[in-house]
Image (cartoon, rainbow, N blue to C red):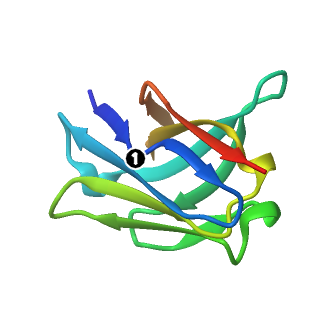
Amino acid sequence: QVQLVESGGGLVQAGGSLRLSCAASGSIFSFYAMNWHRQAPGKQRELVAAITSGGNTNYVDSVKGRFTISRDNAKNTVYLQMNSLKPEDTAVYYCNAHRSYSGTNWDYWGQGTQVTVSS
């Protein structure tokens, strides 16, 4: 089991920055790929950024060059640095821990943190 707690959301003006944090507990954090998803009202949840257990990263095109995902395995925490925020970044952001091993998948989710970007 992995418990995930997000923090760092809030209200920011367009062009501003926020840093989201996701603190994990309950299992070996370094084994898991960590992802940030978001869901805007009336839209499907989308994967925004991902970081593997080895530190490789990937981003959805709409945030490339603006968002940076990172992890600190010593602190069991994953971060999402969001710069040059746009109103279309407004959504609830969810942290997700994922692991695949011997044909079995594990997925754990945080409760979400609201990010609102005003124009």
112 sits left or right of 84 in the view = left
Q: Residue at x 47, y 63 (%)?
A: 52
Give the residue at x 50% y 41%. Answer: 10
Which residue is found at the position 66% from the left and 72% from the top?
66
Q: Nearer the viewer, residue 15 or 51?
A: 15
Residue placed most toward the observer, 115 or 36 = 115
Location of residue 16 by image quarter = bottom right
Residue located beneath label 1 in the image: 8
From the viewer's perspective, tell me whether residue 71 is left or right of residue 92.
Answer: left
Q: Residues within 10 Å of mark 1 (few under 14, many from 20)?
A: some
Amino acid type shown at disc 1: Gly
Q: Position of residue 95 (x, y in %)?
A: 47, 40
Residue at the bottom extreme, as displayed: 65
* Quarter residue 115 falls in: top right
Counting from the top left corner in percent of width and height, residue 55 is at: 43, 72
Q: How many marks?
A: 1
Viewer-side residue, 42 vs 71: 42
| Residue at the (64%, 67%) spot, across then down | 58
